[in-house]
Image (spheres, rainbow, N blue to C red):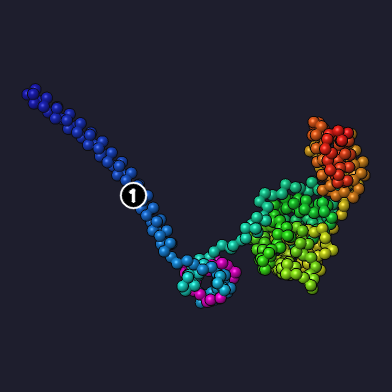
């Protein structure tokens, strides 16, 4: 009897051990099965992606075109990139809301059916004209020019921030504003300050950038710049050095002059097409308003002309204080004397004087700018003389 009990216990121990071993094996196989399923799903996904890529590679290349008109029977008139226009069908997968006149579309190679709506192309030069970071200049950086600042704010800032005021009064805001005056009088500085206060997209265009070598390129750039301003509204489009493309047209002109005139005519056309109450404000700046074409100056294009003059004695004092507020300046500096010694100096000249006075202090290993530094800087900047070759010549 005891021997049979021992045999039974041994058998039970063996069975339990075997059962546990099999359970561990089953769990290991289950884990392996799950890992293989995950791997299989990844491989299937990769296979589907490769099939899709292969299908795309086997498709014929597509033409690009521009929609001219949408017809009622599910068709459209499209001008292809090769030149001729066609009446084509529209793929059912395309939303009709995306199809508007002027939109770029992809066309089938054989039947020219519209298969896809493409994003509008923008010249890299046009995209680079947008100032990515907001200008840091504020109204407190402007010395004098109170009347000019008020007129610019009424023309640009109020229509963007409070358009309801013009609706209540019943008038249209000026369509564009032209800033003119001598170099360094604060035109660009004031535009940057307005762009900072309005939080609008700031697009700066140099007039000479619109002058291109090939026929029609300048006019195309003008169209794309204005379209870019519309797409990124509210925006401020600042055209600096306007006289580069806006000079008076001549009867006798070279081929280069005629291309500049084509660019000017496109600019006039774009200015006529803008709504005064839109979210795009146009600002032009020039040092030579006397040579601008009369068509550019007439009401309806640049409605308001703001003249920038050289600063007065009081304004020069204010500009000196603005440019020296972050400098370590000696308390004995007489700003009234500095203003009297800088008659006919522009704001840019005064800024150069303050920087040069700081350089005199640095050259002598000092941390405080003295009254004598300013006097030497005035003499150097306004006389246009070259810096001395040795430090002793400053004494």
Judge whether residue 227 can be spotted in this image. Answer: no
Q: Quadrant of residue 169?
A: bottom right
**Going by the image, does 348 lie left or right of 57?**
right
Report the front residue among 237 and 56: 56
Give whichever of 90, 150 is nearer the camera: 90
- Residue at 53% across, 68% down: 64
Q: Position of residue 340 (x, y in %)?
A: 92, 44
Q: Which residues are magenta?
A: 84-105
Q: Position of residue 393 (x, y in %)?
A: 87, 35
Q: Mark 1 = which residue? A: 40
Question: Given the current orientation, which residue lies at the most extreme left position?
Answer: 1
Residue 286, horizontal then vertical, whole percent = 80, 59
Quadrant location of residue 273?
bottom right
Front-most of 61 and 3? Answer: 61
For the C terminus, the image quarter is top right
Whether residue 31 is visible: yes
């Amino acid at each position: 009897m005891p021997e049979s009990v021992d045999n039974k216990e041994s058998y039970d121990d063996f069975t339990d051990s075997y059962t546990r071993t099999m359970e561990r094996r089953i769990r290991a196989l289950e884990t392996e099965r799950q890992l293989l399923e995950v791997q299989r799903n990844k491989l299937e996904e990769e296979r589907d992606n490769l099939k899709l890529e292969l299908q795309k590679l086997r498709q014929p290349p597509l033409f690009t075109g521009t929609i001219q008109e949408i017809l009622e029977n599910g068709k459209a008139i499209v001008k292809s990139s090769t030149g001729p226009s066609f009446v084509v069908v529209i793929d059912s997968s395309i939303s009709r809301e995306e199809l508007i006149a002027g939109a770029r579309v992809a066309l089938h190679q054989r039947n020219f059916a519209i298969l896809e709506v493409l994003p509008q192309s923008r010249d890299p030069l046009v995209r680079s004209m947008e100032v990515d970071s907001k200008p840091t200049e504020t109204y407190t950086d402007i010395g004098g020019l109170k009347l000019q600042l008020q007129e610019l704010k009424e023309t640009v800032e109020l229509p963007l921030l409070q358009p309801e005021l013009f609706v209540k009064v019943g008038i249209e805001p000026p369509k564009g504003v032209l800033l003119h005056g001598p170099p360094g009088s604060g035109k660009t500085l004031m535009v940057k300050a307005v762009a900072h206060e309005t939080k609008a997209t700031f697009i700066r265009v140099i007039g000479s950038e619109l002058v291109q070598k090939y026929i029609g390129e300048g006019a195309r750039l003008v169209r794309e710049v204005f379209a870019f301003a519309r797409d990124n509204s509210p925006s401020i489009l600042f055209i600096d050095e306007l006289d580069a493309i806006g000079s008076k047209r001549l009867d006798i002109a070279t081929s280069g002059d005629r291309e500049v005139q084509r660019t000017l005519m496109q600019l006039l056309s774009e200015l006529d097409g803008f709504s005064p109450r839109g979210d795009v404000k146009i600002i032009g700046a020039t040092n030579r308003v006397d040579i601008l074409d009369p068509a550019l100056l007439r009401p309806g294009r640049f409605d308001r002309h703001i003249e920038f003059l050289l600063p007065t004695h009081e304004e020069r004092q204010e500009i000196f204080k603005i440019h020296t507020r972050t400098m370590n300046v000696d308390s004995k500096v007489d700003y009234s004397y500095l203003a009297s010694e800088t008659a006919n100096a522009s704001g840019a000249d005064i800024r150069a004087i303050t920087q040069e006075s700081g350089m005199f202090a640095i050259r002598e290993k000092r941390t405080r700018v003295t009254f004598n530094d300013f006097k030497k800087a005035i003499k150097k900047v306004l006389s246009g003389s070259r810096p001395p070759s040795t430090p002793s010549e400053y004494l």
